[in-house]
């Protein structure tokens, strides 16, 4: 019997839009560098992923972003104050908007299930996003509050322990094959991939327990699981 739903946030409930690329462009403009913002941000994501994979001691996402920009400046031999300039990227995190169907679906699901958030993010920007988008959930877990990042098993087990539910009692919903599907599956959680832009291929779509393209498709899957 499914009792709770754990949602990823960004790309699942809230759109990231083009905010990060726009912020990258503003940083380049600030330091007077003529470079394609998309290229700059693509390299930023590479450094970010490298940091996350090599992390041995927890640091906040804000610190990770600072390190990202420091490495970018060194890689491209750019002159700038990374600790000051990174604020442009960090500020962009506060303006993200919920997908059109998010609040309606959360409201309907909350009548039958406990609704939780499990997100790789610092707590403050997430709380601002939830308030600005009038989103209501039962409890929020961030990488900052858990001191763990997805897809480490501890991220998911700490949530389960706190909500006092077994893996078989919850589902995890998210847009990342690694963080929101394979991570939760590693501790026995039924995992649903939301693939809004049909970016995953046929073989990848076999990995999740279920695939949806819109949050409105969740109710039927959950009803089938409880029958």
Image (tube, helix red, strand yellow):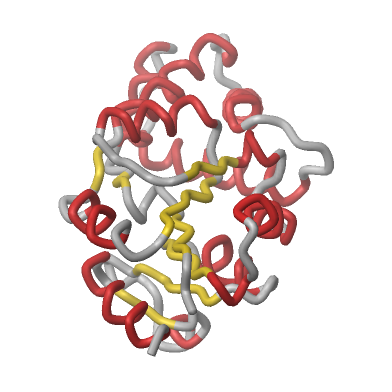
Tell me the residue at 37%/35% (across/down). 20
Q: Which of 215 and 136 is in front in this view?
A: 136
Residue 75 in view of the camera: no
Point out residue 13 in the picture as x, y percentages from the top left corner. Answer: 32, 51
Q: Nearer the viewer, residue 113 or 15?
A: 113
53, above or below 225, in the image: above
45, above or below 26, in the image: below
Point out residue 137 in the picture as x, y percentages from the top left corner. Answer: 38, 45
Point out residue 215 in the picture as x, y percentages from the top left corner. Answer: 27, 65
Q: Nearer the viewer, residue 65 or 25?
A: 65
Task: Give the number of marks.
Answer: 0
Q: In which quarter of the image is residue 210?
A: bottom left
Residue 15 in view of the camera: yes
Tell me the residue at 54%/11% (across/down). 80
Instruction: Answer left or right for 80 relative to 217.
Output: right
Point out residue 30 in the picture as x, y percentages from the top left corner. Answer: 39, 12
């Amino acid at each position: 019997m499914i009792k709770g739903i754990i949602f990823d946030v960004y790309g699942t409930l809230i759109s990231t839009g083009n905010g990060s690329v726009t912020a990258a462009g503003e940083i380049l403009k600030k330091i007077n560098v003529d470079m394609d913002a998309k290229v700059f941000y693509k390299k930023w994501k590479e450094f970010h992923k490298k940091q996350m994979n090599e992390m041995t001691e927890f640091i906040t996402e804000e610190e990770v972003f600072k390190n990202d920009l420091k490495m970018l400046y060194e890689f491209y031999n750019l002159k700038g104050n990374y600790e000051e300039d990174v604020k442009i990227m960090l500020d962009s995190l506060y303006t993200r908007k919920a997908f059109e169907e998010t609040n309606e679906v959360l409201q309907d699901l909350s009548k039958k299930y406990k609704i939780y958030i499990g997100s790789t993010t610092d707590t403050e920007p997430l709380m601002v996003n939830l308030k600005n988008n009038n989103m209501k959930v039962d409890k929020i877990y961030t990488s900052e509050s858990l001191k763990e990042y997805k897809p480490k098993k501890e991220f998911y087990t700490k949530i389960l322990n706190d909500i006092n539910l077994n893996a078989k009692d919850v589902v995890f919903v998210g847009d990342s094959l690694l963080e929101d599907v394979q991570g939760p599956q590693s501790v026995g959680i039924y995992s649903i991939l939301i693939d809004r832009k049909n970016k995953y291929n046929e073989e990848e779509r076999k990995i999740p327990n279920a695939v949806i393209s819109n949050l409105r498709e969740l109710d039927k899957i959950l009803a089938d699981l409880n029958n």
